[in-house]
Image: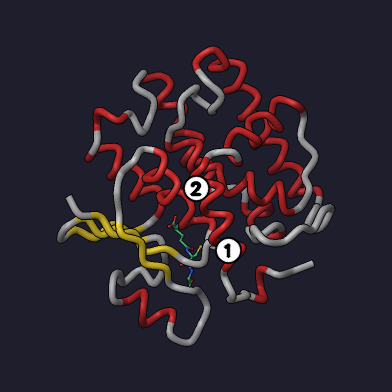
Amino acid sequence: MSFTLIIGNKNYSSWSLRPWLLMKQFGIEFNEIRIPLYQTETQSQISQYSDSGKVPVLIHNTLTIWDSLAICEYLAETFPNLNLYPQDKTARALARSISAEMHSGFQHLRQNMPMNCRASKPGKGMTQEVQKDIERITNIWRQLRRQFFQEGNMLFGKFTIADAMYAPVILRFKTYGVQLDSVCQDYSGAILELPAMQQWLEAAENEQETISASEIG
Ligand SMILES: N[C@@H](CCC(=O)N[C@@H](CS)C(=O)NCC(=O)O)C(=O)O
C-alpha cells in the first residue's frame, strides 16, 4: 500500500497535524510532502494533488482524500484491526462526536489563538468567548479521563482519532499559556511527550517560513 500525505508548515498547520500524528502513532507508513502555506506558489502546488486548495490531502494509490477528518475516517476503515477509533460502539460514538465537535467548532479559540508551535505568548488571545471554548474542551477531557483512566492516559485510554483531533489544541494551550487543572495538564503532557509530537515540534522549530496572520499578539 502506498500513502502520500500532503501537509502544510508544521509550525502553523493545525489541520495537517491530525492525520500526520495519527499515521505516526499507528505505524502507518507514508511519504510526506510539505507545502509551505500562503506563498505565491502554494495554491499551484496544492492543486497538483487536490482541487480543494487546502491541506492535508492523502493520496492512497490512485485515490485522493482531502479534509483531515475524512482522511482519519478513511484510515480507520482501511485498517479496521488497528482500532483507530475505539472498538466499543458506545465509546466510538463518543469519539466521533467529540472529533466532529472539534472539526466544526471552537471558532473563537481557532481565530484568537492560531497554532504557532515555535511561539510563546502567555496570556495573548484570551477573550470571554475563547474562555468558553476552553471550558468546553477541558470539560470533555475531564469527563473522558474520568471514564477511561483505567485503560490508559489518552482520552479513550489508548490513542485514537479523538486524540489526534485535539492535539493541535494542546499546542495552542502551550503557546498561549492556558492554565489547566491537573487532569488536563496530565493529559496534555502525555500527548506532548509522544515521540511523534516531539518529532513534529522539532521540525516546526527548524522551519524558516513565517505566516504573519498567525503571528498575532
Ligand atoms: N476542514 C479542512 C481545513 C483545511 C485547511 O483549512 N487547511 C489550511 C491549512 S491548516 C490550508 O490548507 N490553507 C491554505 C489556504 O487556504 O490557502 C480539514 O480539516 O482538512
* Disc sitting over residue 145 in the figure: none
Residue under numbered circle 2: 103
Q: Looking at this rendering, what residue extends furthest in the bottom direction?
A: 40
Ligand 1 has an atom within 8 Å of the beta carbon of the residue at disc 1: yes
Q: Report the residue that reaches farthest toward the top.
A: 150
**Residue at image coords 24%, 60%:** 64
Residue 68, x across and y down, in percent: 41, 52
Q: Residue 171: x, y in percent?
A: 64, 49
| Residue 12 numbered tag | 1
Q: 195 above or below 64?
A: above
Based on the displayed image, in which of its 4 quarters is residue 43 positioned? bottom left
Number of dots carrying numbers: 2
Question: Where is residue 210 drawn, in percent x and y?
Answer: 62, 75
Apparent side of residue 42 relative to residue 118 in the rendered image (left or right): left
Question: Disc 2 residue type?
Answer: His
136 left or right, relative to 131: left
> Which secondary structure, mark 2?
helix
Gap in angstroms between the C-alphas marked 2 and 1 = 17 Å
Q: Would you say the beta carbon of the disc 2 residue lies within 8 angstroms of ligand 1?
A: yes
Residue at 84% across, 53% down: 123
Circle 2 Cα neighbour tier, 10 Å, few/some/many (<14 / 14–19 / ≥20): some
